[in-house]
């Protein structure tokens, strides 16, 4: 049996899950080929395969995979896996969505037995069968450019933020990976040149004691390696005592989904944090010398122009210009099929039809002038690809100031610094623009 496993985009990371699937079914009778279209674009003769597997971890990857599938004759068996697998199955009913690669779903679909010793919790993924790690995201800091690897201590999430695709699949549950798996997986990546590791857990502090134990072990074994992770605002505050330990263990930055300063919207998104909590989380991170990189989703049906003013004020007050990617200030709510936000009464009146091409529901703004602001900010970014990020940020603030008759920049002598960040800063819960799609297809996003 010949199986082709494909990945289209996984946020600048090696598609590790593909290595896990190969490990699960590896046998003399099965030949696997792997293509990651985010870094390679080979001519493929799909006719030669008995099975095609498509990794659909997030919206952008799914949009790209649909483009790939157009006008192709497919093998009899096509399956998809990952958070957006059900969306892809919806798009093309001949594709089977495997919701869980741990149970027997895929065994039955392929009609083969898994290797008896395989367990997702303990398996050390054989990354040698994936494209080399140097092709993926790097840690950049001024002129320094280091290979970055990635690992998870857990999968799933115990929260149910209404805009997030993860609870649609995991329903408030998460599982842990074993310490041995993570240590050996990181060791393999360090041996391949990684000097920085991103923890890709949806939230590193879903299981803070487990996470810290792993980080302590890694730090002892690889004291020169640095780390980043994603931690929600609620957990930064709740687990401040654990957060304090991160800096001494080489955690150099933490990504945190702030979304907005609008408390009404934060309630609808069920983020379990308020606008006041944002300041608290920033202060905790700054006190502990860990850069905080807020992600934003400023635009949703309920956005007011004032929200953008408040976001910029927060960035200015805490000197966060370096840790906010300009594209973040343009992000709109994405509503995929089965999104939890469809269950919120507040969405009624704004929700429009499902758009099969963008794989999301359309929606209206309460305030039309907010739409004009979002489009202006976004078009500005489209028109200024050659500007550096600081200049882009200042240009965007100028647009907000002009449209809201406000004055937001008080520090005219801001000293902009280089800070460490990943070369790939796209993220899952947003609709990709043509800029992102073009960057991903040409691999200019990554290195
Ligand atoms: S946004 Fe973060 S914390 Fe909320 S459900 Fe998604 S992964 Fe979990």
Image (cartoon, rainbow, N blue to C red):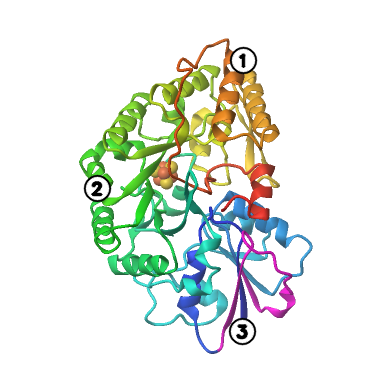
Alpha-carbon distance for marks 1 and 2?
44 Å
Q: Position of residue 307 (x, y in %)?
A: 50, 21
Along the horizontal axis of the image, is 355 left or right of 9? Answer: right
**Residue that extends furthest to the top in the rendered view of this protein:** 405
Looking at the picture, tell me which residue is in the foreground, 78 or 128: 128
Q: Within 10 Å of the Cα at label 2, are there few (<14), some (14-19), or many (20+) other Cα atoms?
A: few
Q: Earlier in the sequence, mark 3 or mark 2?
A: 3
Q: Identify the residue at horizontal 48%, vertical 23% (top origin).
A: 312
Q: Which residue is mark 2?
A: 248
Alpha-carbon distance for marks 3 and 1?
60 Å
Q: Position of residue 425 (x, y in %)?
A: 52, 45
Q: Which residue is mark 3?
A: 1
Q: Identify the residue at horizontal 53%, vertical 52% (top origin).
A: 11
Whether residue 39 is visible to the viewer of this picture, yes or no, is: yes
Q: Position of residue 220 (x, y in %)?
A: 24, 61
Label 1: element kind: helix
Q: Within 10 Å of the Cα at label 3, are there few (<14), some (14-19), or many (20+) other Cα atoms?
A: few
Q: Is residue 285 above or below residue 17?
A: above
Label 3: element kind: loop
Whether residue 160 is visible to the viewer of this picture, yes or no, is: no
Q: Which residue is mark 1?
A: 403
Alpha-carbon distance for marks 3 and 2?
50 Å
Q: Earlier in the sequence, mark 3 or mark 1?
A: 3
User: Which quadrant of the figure contains the N terminus?
Assistant: bottom right
Label placed on residue 107: none
User: Is residue 343 shown in magenta?
Assistant: no
Ligand 1 occupies quarter: top left
Q: Earlier in the sequence, mark 1 or mark 2?
A: 2
Write down the region rendered in magenta: 29-53
Q: Identify the residue at horizontal 38%, vertical 72% (top origin).
A: 124
């Amino acid at each position: 049996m010949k199986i082709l496993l494909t990945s289209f985009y996984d946020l600048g990371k090696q598609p590790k899950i593909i290595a896990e699937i190969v490990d699960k079914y590896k046998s003399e009778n099965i030949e696997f080929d792997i293509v990651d279209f985010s870094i390679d674009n080979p001519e493929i003769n799909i006719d030669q395969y008995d099975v095609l597997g498509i990794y659909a971890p997030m919206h952008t990857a799914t949009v790209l995979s649909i483009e790939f599938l157009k006008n192709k004759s497919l093998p009899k068996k096509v399956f998809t896996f990952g958070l957006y697998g059900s969306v892809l199955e919806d798009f093309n009913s001949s594709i089977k969505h495997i919701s869980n690669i741990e149970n027997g779903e895929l065994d039955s679909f392929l009609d083969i037995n898994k290797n008896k010793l395989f367990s997702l919790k303990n398996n050390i993924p054989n990354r040698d069968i994936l494209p080399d790690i140097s092709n993926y995201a790097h840690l950049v800091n001024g002129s320094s450019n280091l290979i970055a690897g990635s690992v998870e201590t857990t999968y799933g999430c115990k929260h149910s933020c209404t805009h997030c695709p993860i609870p649609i699949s995991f329903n408030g549950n998460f599982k842990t990976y074993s310490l041995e798996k993570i240590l050996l997986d990181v060791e393999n990546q360090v041996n391949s040149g990684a000097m920085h590791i991103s923890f890709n857990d949806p939230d590193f502090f879903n299981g803070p004691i487990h996470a810290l134990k792993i980080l302590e072990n890694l730090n002892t074994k690889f004291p020169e390696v640095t780390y980043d992770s994603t931690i929600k605002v609620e957990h930064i505050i709740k687990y401040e005592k654990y957060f304090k330990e991160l800096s001494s263990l080489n955690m150099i930055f933490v990504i945190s989904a702030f979304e907005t300063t609008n408390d009404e919207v934060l309630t609808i998104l069920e983020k379990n944090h308020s606008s006041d909590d944002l300041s608290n989380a920033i202060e905790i991170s700054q006190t502990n010398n860990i850069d905080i990189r807020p992600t934003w989703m400023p635009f949703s049906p309920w956005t007011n122009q004032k929200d953008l003013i408040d976001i910029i004020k927060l960035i200015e007050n805490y000197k966060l210009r370096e840790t906010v990617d300009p594209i973040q200030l343009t992000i709109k709510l994405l509503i995929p099929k089965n999104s939890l936000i469809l269950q919120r009464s507040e969405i009624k009146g704004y929700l429009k039809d499902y758009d099969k091409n963008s794989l999301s529901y359309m929606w209206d703004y309460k305030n039309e002038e907010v739409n004009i602001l979002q489009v202006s900010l976004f078009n500005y970014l489209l028109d200024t690809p050659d500007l550096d990020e600081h200049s882009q940020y200042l240009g965007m603030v100028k647009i907000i100031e002009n449209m809201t008759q406000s004055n937001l920049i008080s520090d005219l002598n801001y000293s902009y610094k280089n800070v460490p960040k990943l070369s790939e800063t796209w993220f899952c819960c947003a609709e990709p623009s043509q800029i992102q799609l073009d960057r991903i297809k040409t691999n200019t996003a990554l290195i």
